[in-house]
Amino acid sequence: MRLDVVTIFPEYLSPLKLSLLGKAQEEGLLEINIHDLRAHATDNHHSVDDTPYGGGAGMVMKAEVWGSALDPLLVNDVDLIILTPGGKRFNQRMAEQFSQCSQLVFACGRYEGIDDRIRQYYSQNKFADKGVRVHEVSIGDYVLGGGEVAAMVMIEAITRLLPGVLGNPESIIEESHMHEGFAEHPAFTKPQTWRDIAVPEILLSGNHAQIAAWRAQSAKDRAEKNF
Ligand code: 6GU
């Protein structure tokens, strides 16, 4: 899988070099390219934003700058993800769908967002015919300073589903039966008693059917409590 992230803060994405994702890149399972949006600014001040038509607070990121950054990335069979708090809420099902894609391009908006003509332009039939698909995505109901952290959240959720990236594929299979409303069961490891709190007896029984039933019920209870 190839990932491209376009941002005015390339250093913000440096954690992607660490840990499992760093290793996945070294092993060639994954290619991540970070692009500096400001390199596509054309005026003396290298501005990437301007005041909004219609007035109001804040600044809007310029279509010309984004167009120049995105044109070379949106060639064929590629999903453009525009990160915006107004987008479709990201979830595990979307992570699974995006993990099947060959190339994802993350457009990290700052300020009051990206000129909407970017979304409109790359949604046209001439791009759809080339295999360019456009998505507006949010990671939750709160407002971040920009899409960078949201892109990292999505990248972590998506790439751990790729073959060979996560150490333990069995936990992926377990998760695939979960989705919303069916959270994970509580987990325990040694010692059997810690500060007078014992591990549930059933988990020591060796009765796999009963353990599975206990885990399913606990996961349900926990999910309902957290709702
Ligand atoms: Cl994708 N961007 C911003 N700026 N805020 C958010 C978000 C994205 N998702 C949730 N809040």
Image: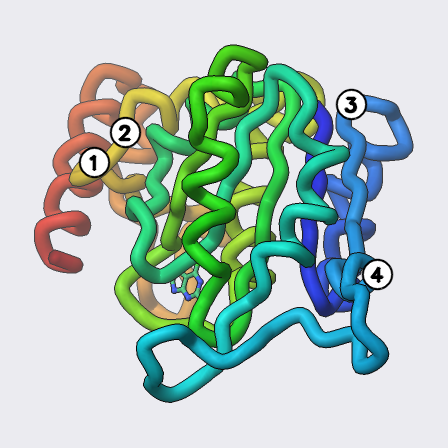
* Most distant residue in the right direction: 26
Identify the element where label 3 is drawn: loop
Chain-order first, disc 2 or disc 4:
4
* Residue 13 percent across, percent down from the top left: 72, 59
Residue depth check, mark 4 versus mark 3: number of the one nearer the observer: 4
Q: Determine whether 177 is above or below 71 in the image.
A: above
User: In the picture provided, is 224 more to the left or to the right than 5?
Assistant: left
Q: Amino acid at mark 2?
A: Met
The CA distance from mark 3 to mark 2 is: 26 Å
Instruction: Sort mark 3 into few (<14), some (14-19) or many (20+) by Cα contacts within 10 Å.
Output: some
Q: Are marks 2 and 4 in contact (CB under 8 Å)?
A: no
Give whichever of 215, 191 is nearer the camera. 215
Label placed on residue 178: 2
Task: Mark 1 and mark 2 in contact? Answer it, CB < 8 Å.
Answer: yes
| In this rendering, the label closer to the viewer, 4 or 1 | 4
- Label 4 vs label 3: CA separation? 28 Å
Q: Type of residue at label 4?
A: Ala
Q: Is residue 182 above or below residue 108?
A: above
The residue identified by callout 1 is 182
Q: Quadrant of ligand 1?
A: bottom left
**Residue 140 locus on image (x, y percent):** 32, 58
Give the mark, 4 or 1, whose residue is nearer the N terminus: 4
